[in-house]
Structure formats: structure tokens, C-alpha cells
Amino acid sequence: MIRKNAFGVDLGTSVVKIYSLRKNRLLSEHDMIAIMGGTQVIAVGNEAFEMYEKNPPGITVDRPMVGGRIADVAEVEMLLKLLLKKTDRHAGKRPLIYFSAPVNMSELEKRAYYAISDAGNPANPRVFLVDRPICDAISLGIPIKRTKGSMILDIGAQSTEVSVIAGEQIIVSDSLPIGGQQLNDAICDEIRRSRNLLIGKRTARRLKSSLATFLSTGREERIVTGIDTLSGLPRKEVIDANLVNKAVEAEMRKGAVMMRTFLERTPPQISGSILNEGIYLTGGTARIPGIERYLCRMIGSRINLGKDYEFSTVKGLEELMQHKEYRRWAHSVKDTK
């Protein structure tokens, strides 16, 4: 086992997850930062999320990650510094930080990780990058050294990372424009079209969490407050599960078509192994009930839903830190410059 002052960090678009080896603690907070006057940090994580869509003038609340990639280095640096301290205030000297990272990063993106590498502690931490599909594979129990073809669907907040692992390496990985936030937008659009009501993204997210399902049409309802598109005045409306499911299914169908096309373009000898093994599904959006059955029907392959789908990537980092045989897939951030 590596020394105790080590952290695994999964910088997600919606949620940041940090595992402390010394504390054996997992911190999970919203990937949000609230800044006043462009420089002063007011809140980060869950506290910043509580201000989202309610922030007063002069305070901006933003996500510094877009599509699973760093969009604002300075904001990620400030966010990470505070969340690492919240995870473990006593990291010690030269802590190890393992980041899950997207595949096929540009040189600019690699330098971004290098720039934030000293955010958590001024004592010159050592930073390593691990490809996100490798983290997922470790967590899902995929035998990376032996697999002849394994496909992973990681449906995140803004994108779905589709990856194929074979021959101890990532053969191909691509990002598809489908994720939890696209589903939220679809719910907003459907309610605007059918009910002439404008709702916020936080409200759409709550409707998705409470009503969306692929198992049945459902009869549940929720009361929401929005702005009437005709009068411009606040109005309450009852939203049922059928309306939410209609929006979610239409958007997810687009993603399923892209996933099936990706599989069809995979070399036959590898796709045969994938179909025999089944496709692995993970990511926060996998929480929608019955989504694995829906994708199975649309893609034409068995779907294996990971048990820790919301924490798959950071759980993979945890396993990597605790077991020496996995650390061959961790690369020093300085080596990637």
C-alpha cells in the first residue's frame, strides 16, 4: 500500500468526489463555486449549489468543469483547494493526488492538470493521472489484463464516455453529447411546450430524480412553480410522470442510437467479445430506474449495471491506491507535459 497521505480525485461535471486514504473517507459535493467580484470565493461545493439560480447580483455561481473536462483552471484550483482541506485538514508533506482524467487530452488540458496540482497543499504534492475508463474498469471488476473486448458506458452529467478496453489498453474512447443535464433541458423544453411554463434547471433535476423511470409510465405527480410564458407571472402546475418520461425517453433514444453506432463500428473480433460479455453501464445518470433494460432493448446487447455506478470512477481510484498491481496505469502529471 502507498503512504497514507494520498487522495483520489474525480472531477466530474456535476459532482466532485475525493477519497482520502488516511481518513478512509469519501467526500462528494457539487462541482460549483460562488465568486463575488470575480476574485473572492464565497462558497464551494454543496453550499455554492444552494445559491444556484438564486444568487444576488455581483455573485456568480458556476461549474468550472464542462463535459468532464476542465473549463476554468483558476476556479478548479480554488474549488479543489477548499474541498481537499474539507476532506482531510492534515494531508502532511508531499501528498499524492491521483486524478481520473479523460482519454485523449490535448496538451493544453494536460497543462491544466499540472497547473492545479499544487492546489490542495503548498508542500509540493506528487500528482498522477489515471484514464477514467481504467478507473471504471477497476471498480467494475473487469479483468483488464485478460479481456479481449469490454465496453463501458459512463453516463455523466453532460456527456457519455464510451470506451473499449482490450489487450490491456484502451482501444478507443469517445464522448457523446448525452447526459443528465441534457435530460434536464429536455424536461424544461417539454414543460414549456405542453404547459406554457418556464421552470429552472434545479426544478427539472428534481422532477427527473423523483419521477423519471423506464420501468412504467407511472402515475406520480409533483407540484412545481414556474413562470407562465403567456402572462409572465409565477404559476404553480401539477407535473405527472408521463410528461417527464416522455422528455427523458426522447432524449435518451438519441444517445442509444449513437451508442449502437459506436458498437457497430467496433472491429468484429472485439465486438463479439463485448456482446458475449455484455456492456458495462455506470455514471450518475444510471440511477434512473430501468435504464439498463431500455439500453439493452435499443442497443441489442446485455447491459451490466455497476452496483456503485454513481461512485464508480472514484472507487476505482481507491482500489488503485490500495493495490500495487493497478498502479501501472497511473502516470505522473509531469510526464504528460
Image (cartoon, rainbow, N blue to C red):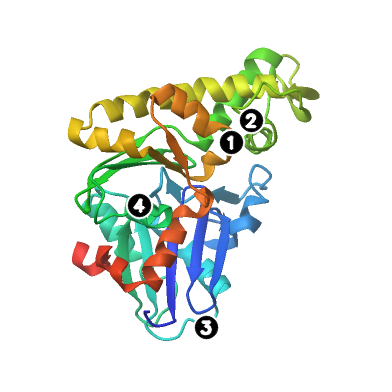
In this picture, residue 205 sits left or right of residue 116: right
- State the CA–CA distance, disc 1 to disc 3: 38 Å
Indicate the secondary structure of the residue bearing disc 2.
Answer: loop
Q: Amino acid under label 1?
A: Ile
- Mark 3 crowd level (few <14, some 14–19, many ≥20, 10 Å Cα): some
| Relative image position of residue 30 (x, y in whole percent) | 57, 53
| Relative image position of residue 38 (x, y in whole percent) | 51, 56
Name the N-terminal-most of marks 2 and 1.
2
Q: Amino acid under label 4?
A: Ile
Q: Amino acid under label 3?
A: His
Task: Report if residue 224 is visible in the image.
Answer: yes
| Relative image position of residue 310 (x, y in whole percent) | 53, 50
Name the residue: 36% across, 77% down: 125
| Relative image position of residue 216 (x, y in whole percent) | 65, 23
- State the CA–CA distance, disc 2 to disc 3: 42 Å
Q: Do the residues labelled 2 and 1 touch (CB within 8 Å)?
A: yes
- State the CA–CA distance, disc 3 to disc 4: 34 Å
Residue with the mark numbered 1? 288
Quarter holding residue 278: top left
Name the residue: 37% across, 79% down: 1
Name the N-terminal-most of marks 4 and 1.
4
- Please count the marks in the image: 4
In this picture, residue 107 sits left or right of residue 120: left
Name the residue: 69% across, 15% down: 196
In the image, residue 232 sits, relative to residue 99, either above or below, namely above
Indicate the secondary structure of the residue bearing disc 4.
Answer: loop
Residue with the mark numbered 2? 212
Q: Which mark is residue 90?
A: 3
